[in-house]
Image (cartoon, rainbow, N blue to C red):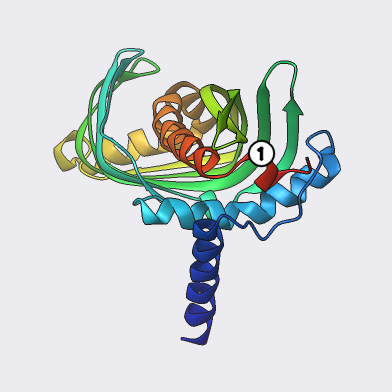
Amino acid sequence: MEAVLKVSCLVLLAIVHVQSGVLPVDKCSLSDKGCLVPAVQKMLPIFLAKMQEYGGGDDLKLTPINFDLGGLKYSLTGATWNGLKGSVIDSVNWDAGKKALTIDFHTDVNVKGAYTADGTIMEKPITGDGELNLKLKNLQVKLTINFETVNKGGKDHLKPTKYSYEFDVKDNAHYDMTNLYNGDKAQSDDMLNFLNGNWKAISTAFSPPLLDNALNIIHNHVISFFDEHSVGDISKE
């Protein structure tokens, strides 16, 4: 109970700071990479607390996903993406000339939701309608956000315009899917062994729709964050 109370107080404190426009982090020169990494790491729980106000936070509620990729028709609904809170910021690069902010980070991710699947994966037939539990171990992401600078109330603000990313699942991806092949256990076990035995190739090919969904939600919150906070709020002028 005491631990829960401490966490709740920290989240409340972060929200108060954000709402007041005062960020409890050290300001950095935007060219000082050594300062930016710990500053962004410290700002992460504040950003997540703000996201939580709008139904975000560490458990992102993904919008419905539908794709037809490599012979597989797939849908995922009611899904959550968990793992942002444990993100470790590896590097931060601010390129004023290209008007781009690049953040490299890694984290473990857990995705849960209701799936439907019909088609083939790497030429292996698959069909099912049940629950997905996907764990990505050491997901590394390089996120680049392009921006423009706009004046708002006499202060410069960053206005993100688009984003791009690269990713790599470094250590492991583990798939658990219920009701494959209408509950046929032998076929289900065979497919799950296949998925988990070929996790690298499968996660590389089929993770982009999940990442697109999650990063689009994060990008929208980044837009709101920079709209509320001027460049002077987050950096040395």
Residue 38, given in percent of the width and then of the height, sits at: 76, 51
Q: Is residue 70 visible?
A: yes
Q: Residue placed at 48% from the left, 69% from the top?
A: 12
Q: Farthest residue in the bottom direction?
A: 2
In the image, is residue 110 above or below residue 18? above
Q: Residue placed at 54% from the left, 37% from the top?
A: 153
Q: Residue placed at 79% from the left, 45% from the top?
A: 28
Residue 15, given in percent of the width and then of the height, sits at: 49, 62
Foreground residue among 194 and 40: 40
Foreground residue among 42 and 199: 42
Residue 165, given in percent of the width and then of the height, sits at: 57, 24
Foreground residue among 80 and 183: 80
The quadrant the C terminus occupies is top right
Q: 94 left or right of 20?
A: right
- Check disc 1 and report the residue beneath it: 231
- Residue 78 found in image quarter: top left
Foreground residue among 230 and 192: 230
In the image, is residue 49 above or below residue 32? below
Residue type indicated by callout 1: Val
In the image, is residue 216 above or below residue 146? below
Identify the element where label 1 is drawn.
helix
